[in-house]
Image (cartoon, coloured by chain):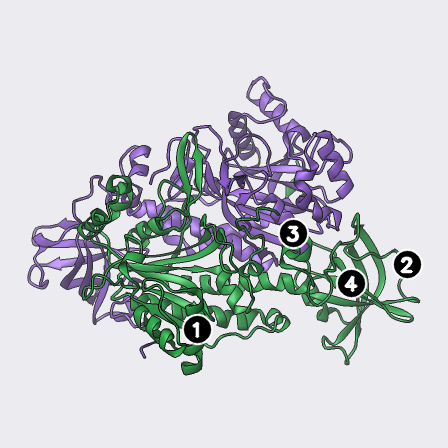
Chain colours: A purple, B green
Amino acid sequence: MIKITGNLEKVTVEVEELSNYIGKTVQIHGSIYKIRKMSDFAFVLLRAKREIVQCVYSKGMTRFPLEELEEESCVIVTAYVQEESRSKKGYDLQIQNIEVLSKPEDPSPIVINNKYVDTSIEKLLDFRPITLRNEKERAIFKIQEGIVDGIREFLKKEKFTEIRTPKIVYAGAEGGANIFHLDYFGKIAYLAQSPQFYKQMMVGVYERVFEIAPVYRAEKHDTSRHLNEYTSVDFEMGYIDSFEEIMQTETMMLRHSVQYLEQYYETEINLLKIKLPVINEIPVIKFIEAKELVAKEYYRKINDYDDFEPEEEKLLCRWIKKETGSDFVFVTCYPSKKRPFYAMESKENKEETLSFDLLFRGLEITTGGQRIHSYQEQIEKMRKREMDIEQFESYLMMHRYGMPPHGGLGLGLERFTSRLLEQENVRLSTLFPRDINRLVP
Amino acid sequence: MIKITGNLEKVTVEVEELSNYIGKTVQIHGSIYKIRKMSDFAFVLLRAKREIVQCVYSKGMTRFPLEELEEESCVIVTAYVQEESRSKKGYDLQIQNIEVLSKPEDPSPIVINNKYVDTSIEKLLDFRPITLRNEKERAIFKIQEGIVDGIREFLKKEKFTEIRTPKIVYAGAEGGANIFHLDYFGKIAYLAQSPQFYKQMMVGVYERVFEIAPVYRAEKHDTSRHLNEYTSVDFEMGYIDSFEEIMQTETMMLRHSVQYLEQYYETEINLLKIKLPVINEIPVIKFIEAKELVAKEYYRKINDYDDFEPEEEKLLCRWIKKETGSDFVFVTCYPSKKRPFYAMESKENKEETLSFDLLFRGLEITTGGQRIHSYQEQIEKMRKREMDIEQFESYLMMHRYGMPPHGGLGLGLERFTSRLLEQENVRLSTLFPRDINRLVP
C-alpha cells in the first residue's frame, strides 16, 4: 500500500533563499511578469509568491528562444546565481534555461505589469482575477494580512479566545432595515450584521473573545466607504471597569498591529509608500462637543444633532491632526436613540451611551461601547423600545443567568486598510467587493 | 483634551500568574462556578478565562457571608496566596473578601457545573449560552482554536497568504441544488458553498493561499455529520508536480496542528481525555479498490459504484486502523462524474479524477485534488457538461490569461474537531450549530 509520509521535497528553490546559492545553479518557478528587451539581452521579471525577481536573459547563455517567451506564462527557470556587488541583493540571476509549464490562451486585455494598473475602478474590479496580479495591487492584501496577524497576535497575548459564530441568524443585532433576508428551509433567516449577540454570550464563557469574519449590511448607499459584505474585527471583553478600558485596548491593539507591519511588511510598506500612523496617545472628544467644534471652526450649520455627516468626520479629523498631530480620534457618548438596544447608558445622563467611534484619517473605522449586563435593565430598555422580548429569549439567557460588566467593539478591516493606504475608495482594499451594483467576480 | 494612552493597568491578577504571588494578597476576578460547602469551610470554584480556580472560604477569615454567595455571580475575590506543598499548584487561595459585580436573575435551569452537562443534545444546544460555561464544553472550543492556530502557523511557514473572499456569490462552486438563495437588491445571489473559485484566482496572484471561513450547504439531511453552515479550512497551491503534493502538504499540516495542540493545549487534552492521533504516514487507497476491499472484508454488497455509503467509510477506517495503525486514510481517484467541473482527470483514465478524500476515524473530513489549469481543457469539460460558459466568464479569466498547475483542498473544521474528540455528533464541536431544524440560538 502506498503511503503519504508528509515529506515534500521540491527541486525549486524559494526566492527569499537565493542569496544562499551564490555561485550555484538553481531552479526557481513563477509567472513571467514582464519581458524587457534590451539590445543584446533582456530582463525577464518573474512573479514569485511575494517578490518580483529580475532574471537576465543573454543570447549566448540562455537555451530558450526569447521570442517564444510570453508574459503570464508559468515557468521553471534554471539560473546561475552570480555574485554582483552592484545589485541590491548581491547577486544576479543568469538564465540558463526555461521550462514552460503553462501558457495563457490570450494576452491580458489590461496592462497589469506597469507600476500600477492604469484604468477605472470599474475595470480594475471587473478584471480582478488578473488586475490583482499587479505588484502594487497584490501588495495591498499582504498589508491587510499583516494588519490581521498583528491584531491576532496582540489579542492572543491578552488572552482573548478566537471564536466562530454563525452568519445565518434568526434576528439582526443592529436593528433597522439594512439586513439581508434568506429562505432557510421555509423559515425566514437573516445574514448577520455583526456577531454582537454571540460574542457577548461567549464573554460569559471565556471572558475575552474575538472573531474576524464577514458581516453583511443591505445598505443601498453606493458610496466610496460602504460595502455590503465586509470583514469585521470584533472583540468583546468582560470585567471592565469602564468603557474607557475598551478604548485603551483598541489603542494597544492598533499600535501593536502597526508595529507588526513595520517588522514584517517592509517590502510592501515601501512599495506602496505607506505613511504608518504614530500611535502614542489618541485624543477623546464627546460627540456633542465634536459637533459644536466642527461647526464653530469650519463655519458650518449643524443639520443633524444625532449623527455625523461624512464631511464633519473629515473636518474633525483635520482639526485633531492640526492640533494634536494624531491621525486618530475617539468620539464618545453618542446619543442613546442612535445606538442599539444593548448599549449601556451613562448613569449621569440617560440620553447618552457609554459608547464610542474611532475615526481614522477622516473615516469612522470602529464602533464600540459598554453593553448592558443586568437582565432587568436590558428588559426594561427593550420594553421602552417596544421590542419583542420573546424573540430574544436565547440572547437574554446570558443576562438572566449571570454576566460580568463587559463591552467591546467592531473594526471594519477594509476601512482601516483603506485609510492606512490613503485610498479614495474602500473597494480598493477589498479583494472581491460586494456593493449594490457588484456581485461579480 | 482627554487622551487615551493605551496603558491599561488592572488591579486584578491573571490566574496563570498566581504562583508569582505566594505569600501575598491579590485580587482575581471570575464567575462563581461552584460552591462546595464542607463542615466549617467551603470550596469556592472560580471560573476564569481558561481555568477553574479553587479558593478556600473559611468562616474566621473571609469577610463575606457565604449564604449570600450565588453561583454564576461575577466577583472580585481578594485572597491570600498561601504556600501549600500538598496542592498541585504549590499554593492555596484563602479568601479574605468578595466583591460582587453582578448577580444572576435566576439560578441556571440546567446543572452546568458538574463534570459534564447531563442532558440531551437538544437541550444542550437550546441552552448553549449557559451550557458552554461548563468546563468541558468550553474546553472543546479551546481545542478548536488550537487546531486552527496550528494550521495557520504551518501554512504561514510554508508561505501561504491568508485571504478573505466573499460569501455572497453569483454562482455555486460545487453545483447541485444544495445552495442557499438570497435576494440581493432584486437579483438572485447565493451563499458560497466553498471559496473554490476565489482561492483558485488567488493562486494566480500569490501562488499559495488559504482561507478559514464559513461555507454554506442547503442540505436537507438531518444527520450526525451534516451542518448547514460550517467552517472550511481551504488551501490552494500552485506549481504542484502532482496531486500527491497536496496530500503531502495536508499530512504535514495536520501533523503540525496535532503537535501544536500537544504543546499549548495540555490542560484541555487532559480534561477531555483526547487521544491524539499519531501521524507518521497516511495510507493511500484508490476509491474503487477501497469499495471492493470493504465489500470483501465485511461481506457487503456494493450498492453504489460512484460514492461511499457512510457505513463503508467507517468500515474502511476500521480495516486501515487494524492493518496499519493509522487513524487516517487517503482515498484517491474518485469517479469523474461525481466530482465538480474543475477537477482534473487522470491522463490514463478520463473517468477518474486526480482527487482525494481524507477519512479520519470513520468520517470524511477533507476533499481535495488537482484542478484544470488550461483554458481549453476547462472550456471543453464545461461544454461536455452542458454548462453555461458565459456565466463563468470571470472565473475563466484566470485560465485564459495564464495559470500554473495547481490544486488544493477543503477541510471541515467541525468534523475534524469532532472526530479528534471522538464525539457522536458534529454539532458538539460547533458553538452555535445550524441545521435544518435549528436556527436558534
Tell us which disc is closer to us: 3 or 2: 3
Whole-angstrom CA distance, mark 1 to mark 4, is 43 Å
Q: Which residue is mark 4?
A: B34
Marks 4 and 3 in Cβ contact (< 8 Å): no
Q: Tell me: residue A438, above or below residue B6.
A: above
Element on which disc 3 rests: helix
Mark 3 or 2 closer to N-term?
Answer: 2
- The one nearer the camera, A44 or B125, is B125
Q: Is residue B161 left or right of residue B439?
A: left
Residue B299 horizontal/vertical position (percent) = 39, 76
Mark 1 or 4 closer to N-term?
Answer: 4
Q: Amino acid at mark 2?
A: Pro
Element on which disc 1 rests: helix
- The one nearer the camera, A51 or A378, is A378
Tell us which disc is closer to us: 1 or 2: 1
Tell us which disc is closer to us: 1 or 3: 1
Whole-angstrom CA distance, mark 4 to mark 3, is 22 Å
Marks 1 and 2 in Cβ contact (< 8 Å): no
Q: Which residue is mark 1?
A: B315
Whole-angstrom CA distance, mark 1 to mark 2, is 59 Å
**Quadrant holding the N terminus of chain A:** bottom left
Q: Is residue A246 left or right of residue B337?
A: right
Marks 1 and 4 in Cβ contact (< 8 Å): no
Mark 1 or 2 closer to N-term?
Answer: 2
